[in-house]
Amino acid sequence: MSIPTLASLLIQETKAAIYAKGLALANALGLPVSSWQAGDPTRSMFHLEAETLSGLEAVVAGYIASGFLDYATGSWLKICAKQFFNVDVPDATFATADVVLTNNGGGYYPDIIPGDLTAKSTTSGKTFRNVTGGTLASGPATTLTLTFVADDAGSASSAGAGEIDDLVTGLLGVTCSNPVAAVGVDEQDEATTRTQCRDKLGSFSPNGPKEAYSYVARNADLTGTSAVTRVRVYSDSDTGDVTVYLAGSSGGVSAPVLALVEAAILQWATPLCITPTVLSASNVSVPVTYTLWVYKSCNKTAAEVAADVQVALEALFAARPIGGDFANVGDVTGKLYTSLLESTIESAVPQSFRVSVTVPAIDTALGLGDVAVLGTVTPTVSIVVDP
């Protein structure tokens, strides 16, 4: 007798299947099923019952799956993470970037306070508001760098380098641009939640496994910040030193975030005789120049295709591990592989059939504490008539 898999037992019956079984049962009891016409009260009652039971099926199947980390999904996974592992799933984040204001005229703008300015990406139409302030001296060519945060959470408000290019708030003669991409992240994907739950188990050990450092660094309840989304831990068993690198969705973290995480790691994840060093990952800006060939059946303009690719690339860079991807067991340093860029670009639009990435021309080598961030994207999209 074969042992059934858990997945095969978590079956949710559809409304159509429940309705069909109801009619079959009625027919077996001798009821005149074939005479029931559309709109017949009895047939309508069967439809209502099937609708009700299918909704209950979804609740029952989800509830059972919530007891198993690998099978729970959606809200049930959040319940599983919280109740079994005491892990809170982070909400979507707001895209954040430093925006350089350039005064090309003679105006003087003192005492700019947080919330005064609104900037926009003309590519996506999404707006951003300043959360830091300062004084912009009279020009020409004087600059002030402020931090702007998207008005809407999630990846839809992400903006590539240079895409926050329109200062909605009128400052005469002032232009704006963001040197580094602003990346918003959708609610944490389920694979990351499962990893975080398993990392939690490592935090219970008094011997300090690397998962303990990773868990604490990502735990906003312990650190007081949700800015850390990526962690990489390196150890030196001969000296007892542990180096922990941190990054957020947009790259390396700020000094205040670093201080918060370091304090939490010292308190919650450091065993005796171990010296942890907590560092921000160093940003390695990677510009991307590509040509993509897409069939006309995609029903999109070249600009719309390029926008889809931009979103896909931003999500890719936000998820790349610190130190790059290690292609072989035993590798000491990793890379950002051009083949991964190519596959990401091509998969952004199902009707694409060819892609050529010319920048970067080769795989980008990364040091242990480096993190790849998306630089300026230069797209060329060729729309081709379907064969």
Image (cartoon, grey):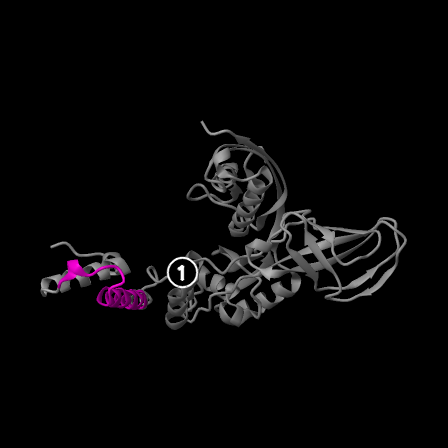
Provide residue 180's location: percent of width, then percent of height: 66, 49
Q: Quadrant of the N terminus?
A: bottom left
- In the picture as drawn, the residue positioned furthest to the right comes out as 106
The part of the image, by quadrant, that contains residue 309 is top right
81 or 266: nearer the viewer: 81
The part of the image, by quadrant, that contains residue 365 is top right
Residue 14 seen from this side:
no
Looking at the rendered structure, the secondary structure element under dot 1 is: helix
**Identity of the residue drawn at 52% across and 47% down:** 316
Provide residue 366's location: percent of width, then percent of height: 56, 44
**Identity of the residue drawn at 40% across and 67% down:** 81
Provide residue 286's location: percent of width, then percent of height: 61, 42
Q: Which residues are magenta?
A: 32-59
The part of the image, by quadrant, that contains residue 85 is bottom left
Total marks drawn? Answer: 1
Provide residue 19's location: percent of width, then percent of height: 23, 61
Is 160 contained in the magenta span?
no
In the displayed structure, does residue 387 sit left or right of residue 57?
right
Q: Is residue 296 above or below residue 106?
A: above
Residue 299 seen from this side:
yes
Q: Is residue 288 above or below residue 139?
A: above
Badge 1 crowding class, 10 Å Cα cut-off, few under 14, some 14 to 19, many 20 or more, is many
49 or 232: nearer the viewer: 49
Q: Three-letter amino acid code at disc 1?
A: Arg
In the displayed structure, does residue 238 sit left or right of residue 121?
left
- Residue matched to label 1: 194
Q: Quadrant of the C terminus?
A: top left
The chief SS type of the magenta part is helix
